[in-house]
């Protein structure tokens, strides 16, 4: 019979030095997401897969939104789509429906000075914003990737294998990836798939059910 797939070349669980951006030690992502408003995203760079945080803060205001970080036009458009989805679905997030118009939102994507130009942070931005507005921290050890549409669909992204390798090396327990990327996940070695639980998302609802269980009102 067919033997188990070998681990990806160069893969070592927890060997996260140098692939997180900004640089983080193993376990530091989990520590940072213990407070509401922080979500971990999966991205890529010329050196391979990378993890990065999206931070969201809320404060009294008039419904203004500010997005900061070293972002390209593509990333800013992705952030705009994500925030529009949150506003449209505020009624499904409890008290948020009553306070959104009196709350300013600041979303920051730190990148250590590296310009970010991919739309795959859409699901991470939504998760961070929903987290801060509902006061619920993201489930520890969860990272995610996926582009979203105004309708809340999660679209496939590239470099999935590299992103999963980064998640494993940084000690993440689970990742959320677009359902359409399932064939890419199946090409990854068995060892990595045993160590990092993979959840598939066809919609932003699927992402939130994993990252913020119980936050959505059906």
Image (tube, grey):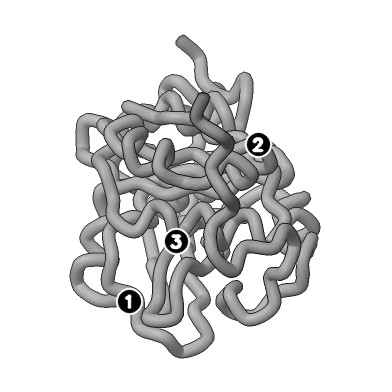
Residue at which label 2 appears? 194
For numbered disc 1, what is the local secondary structure? loop
In this picture, residue 173 sits left or right of residue 218 = right
Residue at (51%, 53%) from the top-left corner? 164
Residue at which label 1 appears? 71
Against 160, is 85 above or below? Answer: above
Residue at (72%, 55%) from the top-left corner? 171
Image quadrant in which you'd find residue 85:
top left
Against 218, is 160 above or below? Answer: below
In depth, the one of 106 and 157 nearer the eye is 157
| Few, some or many residues within 10 Å of mark 2 (<14, 14–19, 20+) | few
Sequence-wise first label, 3 or 1: 1
Whole-angstrom CA distance, mark 2 to mark 3, is 16 Å
Whole-angstrom CA distance, mark 1 to mark 2, is 34 Å
Residue at which label 3 appears? 162
Judged by depth in the image, the label closer to the viewer, 3 or 1, is: 3
| Few, some or many residues within 10 Å of mark 1 (<14, 14–19, 20+) | many
Q: Do the residues labelled 1 and 2 touch (CB within 8 Å)?
A: no
Sequence-wise first label, 1 or 2: 1
Whole-angstrom CA distance, mark 3 to mark 1, is 21 Å
Q: In the rendering, at what x and y percent does residue 156 appear?
A: 26, 43
In depth, the one of 90 and 28 nearer the eye is 28
């Amino acid at each position: 019979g067919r033997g188990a797939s070998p681990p990806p070349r160069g893969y070592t669980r927890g060997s996260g030095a140098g692939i997180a951006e900004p640089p983080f030690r193993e376990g530091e992502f989990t520590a940072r997401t213990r407070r509401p408003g922080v979500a971990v995203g999966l991205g890529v760079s010329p050196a391979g897969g990378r993890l990065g945080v999206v931070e969201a803060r809320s404060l009294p205001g008039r419904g203004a939104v500010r997005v900061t970080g070293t972002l390209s036009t593509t990333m800013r458009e992705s952030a705009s789509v994500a925030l529009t989805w949150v506003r449209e679905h505020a009624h499904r997030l409890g008290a948020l429906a009553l306070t959104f118009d009196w709350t300013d939102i600041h979303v920051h994507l730190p990148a250590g000075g590296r310009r970010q130009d991919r739309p795959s942070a859409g699901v991470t931005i939504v998760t961070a914003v929903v987290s801060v507005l509902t006061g619920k921290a993201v489930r520890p050890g969860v990272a995610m990737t996926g582009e979203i549409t105004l309708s809340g669909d999660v679209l496939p992204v590239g470099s999935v294998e590299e992103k999963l390798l980064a998640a494993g090396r940084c000690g993440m327990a689970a990742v959320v990836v677009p359902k359409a990327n399932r064939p890419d996940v199946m090409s990854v070695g068995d060892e990595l798939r045993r160590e990092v639980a993979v959840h598939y998302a066809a919609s932003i609802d699927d992402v939130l059910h994993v990252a913020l269980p119980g936050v959505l009102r059906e």
